[in-house]
Image: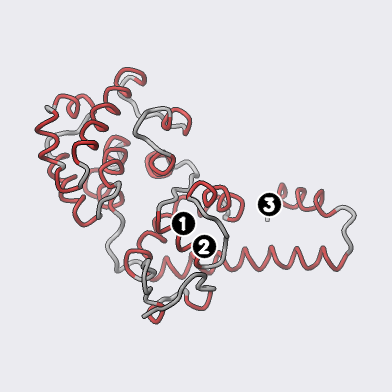
Amino acid sequence: MTKTDCTLYENVLLGTNQNTIIQIMLGVIYMDKLIKNIVSTLQENTTNFIPPLVDQVMVEFGCDPFFILISCLLSLRAKDSTTIHVCRDLFSNVKTFQQLLDVPLYKLEKIIFKTGFYKNKARTLHFVSYEIIKKFNSIVPDNFDDLIAIKGIGPKTANLVLGLAFGKPAICVDTHVHRISNRLGLITTKTPETTEVALQKLLPKKYWIEWNKLLVVWGQNICTPLRPRCNQCAIFSFCKRVGVKSFR
């Protein structure tokens, strides 16, 4: 725990009896250790799986915020295994927002067709490119408020860009992060928005960026939405399996 954390707990616990204080502090220590064990175990057991889409894009095309933002927008409601091929086709000729805006809409729709919702996505890519060119001189904003002010960029995309493109602590909550964080019993939330708030309070900042990558890989391969592969799960002993009715 940091000095700030300790001060916070001291203020909260004023007037609380000693036994209760000890129980609370033991609970905090236990949770910190649990999270550390989950992260380290997943780090060791995800190396043989295909990384999430944006991580693949970063390896192939670099860490330019343009590639990270556009690949994230393309990945919405699409499978990574499909979207990576679309990204390769698009980024082979398009490497800036101006170049993307110069691609006629009908042609862009054909390029990204396989990601699904291609008409809406094509319009979003053009609009986002226009806004960033006009308002930010073709530079992707490095703060949350400016990013989500652009129509088409939501909190999940904004946080992923902040974390991966700029190295700023941010928790990107997608369906896997929301589901597995609750399934583990770490939090009890109903929406991605409340999950983000809960995880910000729970996770040390050093894990904020990596939490998404680890849980996305685990969610795609082991901790699936229906009938998760609990018999193959390296973090089975840490999991409360909340809501799991059957597993493999």
* Mark 2 vs 3: CB contact within 8 A: no
Task: Give the camera-side residue of 119 and 99.
Answer: 119
Badge 3 marks a residue whose secondary structure is loop
Q: Position of residue 245 (x, y in %)?
A: 45, 76
Residue 182 - label? 2
| Residue at 54% over, 49% down | 194
Residue at the spot of label 3: 2
| Residue at 36% over, 21% down | 136
Q: Position of residue 142 (x, y in %)?
A: 43, 32
Badge 2 marks a residue whose secondary structure is helix
Residue at the spot of label 1: 178
Q: Quadrant of residue 32?
A: bottom right
Amino acid at the residue labelled 3 = Thr
> How far is mark 1 from mark 2, CA to CA?
6 Å
Amino acid at the residue labelled 1 = His
Amino acid at the residue labelled 2 = Asn
Badge 1 marks a residue whose secondary structure is helix
Within 10 Å of disc 2 (Cα), the crowding (few <14, some 14-19, many 20+) is many
Seen in the picture, residue 147 relative to 3 is either above or below; the reply is above
> How far is mark 1 from mark 3, CA to CA?
26 Å
| Residue at 50% over, 44% down | 169
Q: Nearer the viewer, mark 2 or mark 3?
A: 2
Q: How is the image coloured?
A: secondary structure
Within 10 Å of disc 1 (Cα), the crowding (few <14, some 14-19, many 20+) is many
Within 10 Å of disc 3 (Cα), the crowding (few <14, some 14-19, many 20+) is few
Q: Nearer the viewer, mark 1 or mark 3?
A: 1
Q: Position of residue 170 (x, y in %)?
A: 48, 44
Q: Quadrant of residue 217?
A: bottom left
- Image quadrant containing the N terminus: bottom right
Q: Position of residue 16 (x, y in %)?
A: 87, 58
> How far is mark 2 from mark 3, CA to CA?
25 Å
